[in-house]
Image (tube, rainbow, N blue to C red):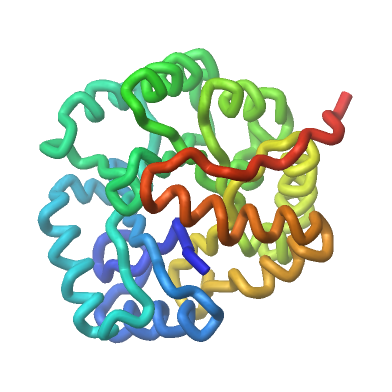
Amino acid sequence: MIDIHFHCLPGLDDGPSNWDEAVALCRAAAADGATRLIATPHVLRGEWINEDVDARDDLVLRLNTLLEGSPAILPGCEYLFSTEALALLDHGTAGPLIGLNRSRYLLVELPAEVSQASVEAAFHEFGVGGITPVIAHPERHPALRRSPERLARLVSRGARCQVTAGSLLGDFGERAADAADEFFRMGLVHFVASDAHSLGRRPPRLAAARERVRRAWGAEAEQGIFEANPAALLVSEPIPWTPPARAVRG
């Protein structure tokens, strides 16, 4: 499996604080069935600025060396959306934002309070510029849970959505699990990732989430979400599978 949202670079954010913790976390993911992990440190989020892409790349290289390629660590970031999004993207490779595995897919976290109009406008421009935003853990976002049509509008503008494995397994409460199921029924779930931070607080649990998806959403969804779509993301190809919209809450 490919885990597209994984906090494993030590000392950068609320993930592992040292190399021993980082290595143990990645090895646990490998034992759970992940062969590739995209390192997604928080960028431009509060105290976690992490603007230096070269410094992040150095940590990815060292972690790969310590792990001896199993699992493989790939570069990425998790960007907290702001009104400066388009200006940051204009910096290109000189800026702090990089796609997942340096692809055209950019992992974006939406703030708790954000203008829907500003996000929609920015996502439209992302698409014009060849960037596909991947919305991180929308099922944990209170405003999107209350108004799932807001998420649907963003997907209609080219965004894709990543649900957290722990949400499917009840780690974030009943509301997050119910929202994930509703988003799936609406055709809005394209990826599941661990968003792992540590072995104790938020461990990698993709295998259990995959089984839950297979049982609740079906084998076709399991294959698309855990195999076909992440593989396409790595090489900047359009995702080959999208869930059919079955029902929308009235």
**Apparent side of residue 140 relative to residue 83 in the rendered image (left or right):** right
Could you say which is closer to the camera, residue 247 or residue 238? Answer: 238
Which residue is rendered at x = 52% and y = 31% of the image? 159
**Apparent side of residue 226 relative to residue 135 in the rendered image (left or right):** right
Which residue is rendered at x = 46% and y = 49% of the image? 232
Could you say which is closer to the camera, residue 34 or residue 39? Answer: 34
Could you say which is closer to the camera, residue 46 or residue 224? Answer: 224
**Apparent side of residue 186 relative to residue 46 in the rendered image (left or right):** right
Residue 66, x across and y down, in percent? 23, 84
Residue 82, x across and y down, in percent? 36, 28
Q: Is residue 118 above or below residue 29?
A: above
**Residue 205, picture quadrant:** bottom right
**Residue 226, picture quadrant:** bottom right
> Is residue 143 visible from the viewing direction of this image?
yes
Q: Quadrant of the C terminus?
A: top right
Which residue is rendered at x = 49% and y = 74% of the image? 34
Residue 155, x across and y down, in percent? 59, 28
Residue 234, x across and y down, in percent? 39, 53
**Apparent side of residue 15 relative to residue 18 in the rendered image (left or right):** right
Q: Is residue 77 above or below residue 128?
A: below
Which residue is rendered at x = 37% and y = 78% of the image? 71
Q: Is residue 112 above or below residue 250?
A: below
Q: How many marks?
A: 0
> Is residue 47 visible from the viewing direction of this image?
no
